Image (cartoon, grey):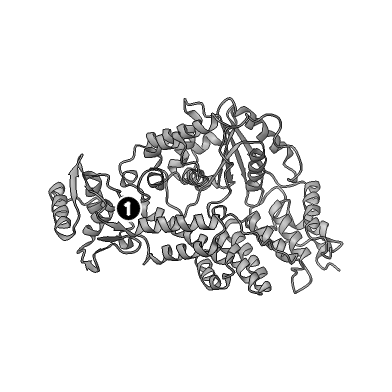
C-alpha cells in the first residue's frame, strides 16, 4: 500500500484509494508513518488527536482509533513500550521517495550531470500535491515534520532550477521564479537564478532591473543590501561578462559554507591582519583577542548597531579570515517568520551534515537528542530518511542543550571553532537559553561565538539571557558599531569608485556622499553606486538617496527625512 503525505494525507491499496474518515484518522496514520517504525507514545498520540480537549477516557478512545485503522488498512499496528508503531515496511511513503530522488538529483548535480539531475528532481517535485500533511500540518506533533519537508521541497526547487540553468533551459524558470518572488521577495537564491535566466535568454536589461528590484526589497524589509554573491553577479553583468561557472548547489540553498572538518593545527598568529575591510580596525583587534582567548574556553563577541552599519560584513570578514587560518566556522541566523526552536543551531547542523560529516562518531552518538533540533538527523544517520516522531514529543530541554554543547565541544577539541549567529534580536527562547547554557557549561567548549543584533529596544531585563551577552566581562566582549568618520567615508567611497573604473565621476561626488550618507556604510555604498551608474532624480539631477540615509545628525537620530546640502542642491 501507499501512504501519501506530500499534500493531504491519503492511503492507497493498489490503485484503490481508501477513505480516511475524519481528521483524527489522518493524524494518527501520519504520526505512525513518520515514526519510521518507532513507537509513538500513547500520551503524544492523545495530545495530537485531542490537544487540550481530552475525552474522559482518552486511552480507550485511542484504542478505538487504532482498531479502526487496523480494520481499514493492511498494516500491522502493534502496541509496544507504551506506544503504537507500524511494523515492517508494508507501506510506501511518498515522502521517503521524494527524499531519495532529491538526494540522487543533488548528487548528479554535484557530479556535473545536470540532465540527470533535472530529471530526478522533476520527478521528486512532481510528488507534491499541496502543502505537506495538508490541513493537519498545525498539529503540534506533526508540525516539525511539515516544516522539515517544506524545507526539503525548497531545497529541491533550488537544485532543480540550478540543473535547468546548467542545461541551458533557464527560460522555463522565469515565470515560476517571478511568481515565487512576488510572494516572498527575500529569496536571494531565486533572484540570482532569475537574473541568470534572463541574461542567458538575451534579456540583459531585465536581468539588471531584477537586481534593482531585489535591492529595493532587501532595503525596504531588512534595511540591508543583498549578499555578496548577488552583488558580484550584478557587477559582472555591468561589465558584460557574468561568470558562467555554476555555483555549488548546496552553497546556494544552505548559506555560507562551513570550513571543511579535518584535524589541523591550533590557530596561531594574527588572523585578522590585512586589507579587505574599510575601517573597524579596533573592532577587528578586539575580535582577534577574543578568538585567541577562546582556545582557553568559550568567548562571546556581541556586535550591535543600526541597520546597514556593517555587523554582517564584519562577521563575514572574521569568517573568511578564520576559515583561511584553519578554523571551523559554522553559521546560523534567527528569523521571526520561521517558528522553529534552536533555528541557528539547526542551520549549523544542517550545513555540517551536508558537508559529508555525518560519519562523525560524536554526531552519531548525540543524534537522538540533536534530532530534536534537526529532525532530518534521524533519517540521515539511521535507516529511514524520514524524521522520527520522537523528536516531536515531550523533549527534555536540558538534554537538547547539553547535546548541542557536547557536539560543539567535540568539534572545538579538534580545531579552533567559530560560531556566527546573525539577527539575534529575533532569536527564539530556546536559542537564547542554549547560548546561555553554552556560556556557563562545565564542558570546556573552546569556541568563539559571534552574535550580531540590531540596536533596537529589546525587552531585556536582568534575568534575560540577552542581558548577559551585552555586558562586558572576561568572557563577553560587546562591540557597538558606530558610523564612519569622514576619513573612513572617503576611503570607502574611493574603494567603490575603483569597482567602476569606466564610470563618469561627478566632481561633487565625494562631498555629496559625505553629507548625505551620514556615515552609515550601507548608505555610503548605495549612494556612490547610484551616482556612478547614473541613477539620478529627474527633477534636478540629484542622486536618489537610499532609504533611511538622511538622518538628522551623525549622532544617530532615528527620524528619517530628505536632506540635501544647500551647496549641492543643483550640482552642475
Decide if residue 357 is on the left or right side of residue 54.
Answer: right
- Residue positioned 81% across, 53% down in the render: 494
Instruction: Give how far across and how far down residue 263 sits, in percent.
Output: 57, 32
- Residue positioned 42% across, 33% down in the render: 402
Residue on which the image places disc 1: 142
Quick one: quadrant of the N terminus? bottom left
- Residue positioned 68% across, 61% down in the render: 243
Quick one: quadrant of the C terminus? bottom right
- Residue positioned 63% across, 40% down in the render: 323
Decide if residue 438 is on the left or right side of residue 257.
Answer: left
Total numbered labels: 1
Note whether residue 305 is visible.
Answer: yes
Note whether residue 464 is visible.
Answer: no
State the residue in front, 327 or 62: 327
Q: Is residue 168 above or below residue 511?
A: below
- Where is residue 482, by image quadrant? top right
- Where is residue 214, by image quadrant? bottom right
Instruction: Give how far across and how far down residue 331 sits, in percent.
Output: 55, 44
Instruction: Give how far across and how far down residue 255 sits, in percent.
Output: 56, 51
Instruction: Give how far across and how far down residue 235 sits, in percent.
Output: 72, 61
State the residue in front, 106 or 331: 106
- Where is residue 367, by image quadrant? top left
SS at circle 1: loop
Decide if residue 49 is on the left or right side of residue 543.
Answer: left
State the residue in front, 303 or 155: 155
Pointer 1 local density, CA inside 10 Å: few below 14, some 14–19, many at least 20 = many
Q: Is residue 562 above or below residue 465?
A: below
Decide if residue 479 is on the left or right side of residue 123.
Answer: right
Amino acid at each position: 500500500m501507499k501512504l501519501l503525505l506530500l499534500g493531504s494525507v491519503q492511503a492507497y491499496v493498489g490503485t484503490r484509494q481508501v477513505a480516511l474518515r475524519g481528521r483524527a484518522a489522518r493524524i494518527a496514520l501520519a504520526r505512525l508513518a513518520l515514526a519510521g517504525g518507532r513507537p509513538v507514545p500513547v500520551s503524544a498520540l492523545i495530545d495530537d488527536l485531542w490537544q487540550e480537549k481530552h475525552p474522559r477516557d482518552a486511552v480507550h478512545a485511542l484504542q478505538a482509533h487504532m482498531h479502526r485503522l487496523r480494520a481499514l488498512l493492511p498494516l500491522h499496528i502493534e502496541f509496544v513500550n507504551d506506544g503504537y508503531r507500524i511494523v515492517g515496511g508494508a507501506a510506501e511513503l511518498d515522502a521517503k521517495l521524494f527524499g531519495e530522488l532529491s538526494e540522487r538529483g543533488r548528487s548528479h548535480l554535484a557530479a556535473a550531470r545536470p540532465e540527470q539531475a533535472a530529471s530526478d528532481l522533476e520527478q521528486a517535485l512532481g510528488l507534491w500535491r499541496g502543502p505537506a500533511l495538508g490541513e493537519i500540518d498545525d498539529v503540534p506533533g506533526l508540525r516539525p515534520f511539515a516544516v522539515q519537508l517544506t524545507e526539503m521541497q525548497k531545497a529541491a526547487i533550488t537544485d532543480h532550477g540550478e540543473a535547468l540553468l546548467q542545461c541551458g533551459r533557464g527560460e522555463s524558470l522565469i515565470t515560476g521564479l517571478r511568481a515565487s518572488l512576488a510572494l516572498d521577495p527575500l529569496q536571494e537564491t531565486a533572484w540570482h537564478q532569475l537574473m541568470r535566466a534572463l541574461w542567458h535568454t538575451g534579456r540583459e536589461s531585465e536581468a539588471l532591473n531584477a537586481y534593482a528590484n531585489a535591492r529595493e526589497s532587501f532595503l525596504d524589509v531588512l534595511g540591508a543590501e543583498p549578499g555578496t554573491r548577488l552583488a558580484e553577479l550584478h557587477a559582472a553583468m555591468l561589465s558584460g561578462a557574468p561568470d558562467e561557472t555554476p555555483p555549488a548547489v548546496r552553497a546556494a540553498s544552505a548559506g555560507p559554507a562551513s570550513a571543511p572538518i579535518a584535524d589541523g593545527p591550533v590557530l596561531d598568529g594574527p588572523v585578522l591582519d590585512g586589507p579587505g575591510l574599510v575601517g573597524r580596525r579596533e573592532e577587528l583587534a578586539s575580535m582577534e583577542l577574543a578568538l585567541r582567548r577562546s582556545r582557553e574556553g568559550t568567548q562571546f563577541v556581541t556586535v550591535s548597531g543600526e541597520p546597514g552599519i556593517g555587523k554582517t560584513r564584519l562577521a563575514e570578514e572574521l569568517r573568511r579570515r578564520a576559515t583561511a587560518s584553519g578554523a571551523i566556522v559554522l553559521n546560523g541566523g534567527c528569523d521571526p517568520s520561521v517558528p522553529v526552536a534552536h533555528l541557528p543551531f539547526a542551520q549549523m547542523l544542517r550545513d555540517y551534515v551536508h558537508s559529508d560529516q555525518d560519519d562523525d562518531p560524536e554526531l552519531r552518538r548525540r543524534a537522538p537528542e540533536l534530532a530534536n533540533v534537526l529532525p532530518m538527523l534521524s533519517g540521515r544517520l539511521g535507516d529511514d530518511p524520514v524524521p522520527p516522531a520522537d523528536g516531536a514529543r515531550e523533549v527534555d530541554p536540558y538534554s537538547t542543550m547539553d547535546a548541542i554543547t557536547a557536539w560543539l565541544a567535540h568539534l572545538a577539541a579538534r580545531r579552533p571553532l567559530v560560531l556566527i549567529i546573525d539577527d539575534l534580536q529575533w532569536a527564539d527562547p530556546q536559542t537564547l537559553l542554549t547560548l546561555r547554557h553554552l556560556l556557563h557549561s562545565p564542558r570546556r567548549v573552546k569556541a568563539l561565538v559571534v552574535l550580531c543584533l540590531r540596536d533596537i529596544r529589546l525587552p531585556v531585563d536582568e534575568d534575560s539571557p540577552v542581558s548577559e551577552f551585552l555586558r562586558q566581562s572576561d568572557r563577553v566582549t560587546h562591540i557597538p558599531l558606530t558610523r564612519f568618520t569622514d576619513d573612513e567615508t572617503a576611503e570607502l567611497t574611493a574603494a567603490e569608485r575603483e569597482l567602476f573604473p569606466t564610470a563618469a565621476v561627478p566632481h561633487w561626488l565625494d562631498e555629496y556622499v559625505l553629507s548625505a550618507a551620514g556615515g552609515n556604510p550601507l548608505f555610503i555604498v548605495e549612494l556612490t553606486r547610484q551616482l556612478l551608474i547614473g541613477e539620478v532624480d529627474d527633477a534636478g539631477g540629484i542622486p536618489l538617496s537610499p532609504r533611511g540615509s538622511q538622518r538628522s545628525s551623525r549622532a544617530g537620530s532615528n527620524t528619517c527625512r530628505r536632506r540635501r546640502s544647500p551647496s549641492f542642491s543643483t550640482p552642475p
